[in-house]
Amino acid sequence: MREIGYDRIRDAVQRLWVEANTVLGEDVRAAVAQAAQTEGSPLGRELLEKVLESDQLAWTQGLPICQDAGMAEVTIRLGQEVHITGGF
């Protein structure tokens, strides 16, 4: 049987949740920047530029990229041979 500490799971989920809400992938950032340059609609261009602005704020200030990130639901499948120690 394998044992894994509750703290290890909690810390990994926390780290990944923060990263998912504050880091925009370089490929996505480049695609949004390209779309902002080629967007024909002034409103569309402004919205794409706001996405890039939010990304910059998230990067420099540790804020979520989107202020309406919603709630996290995490499901962990461990199997029969894993036991969590140190908490629930």
Image (cartoon, rainbow, N blue to C red):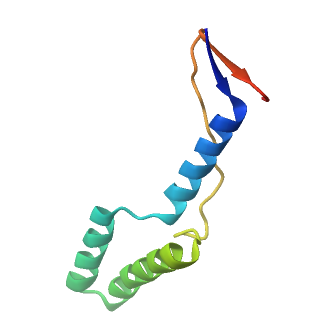
Q: Which residue occupies 29% across, 87% down?
A: 41
On-image quarter of the N terminus: top right
Q: Is residue 39 left or right of residue 19?
A: left
* Number of residue marks: 0
Which residue, as the protein is rendered here, is positioned at the far right? 87
Which residue, as the protein is rendered here, is positioned at the far bottom? 42
Which corner quadrant of the image does residue 32 belong to?
Answer: bottom left
Of residue 28 and residue 36, the one placed in the foreground of this image is 28
Q: Is residue 88 left or right of residue 83?
A: right
Q: Is residue 28 above or below residue 53?
A: above
Q: Is residue 70 above or below residue 49?
A: above
Q: Which residue occupies 41% across, 64% down?
A: 24
Residue 67 position, x and y percent, is 60, 70
On-image quarter of the C terminus: top right
Q: Is residue 46 above or below residue 1?
A: below
Q: Which residue occupies 62% across, 38% down?
A: 74
Q: Is residue 32 left or right of residue 77?
A: left
Q: Which residue occupies 48% across, 73% down?
A: 59
Residue 80 position, x and y percent, is 60, 9
Which corner quadrant of the image does residue 38 belong to?
Answer: bottom left
Of residue 14 and residue 37, the one placed in the foreground of this image is 14
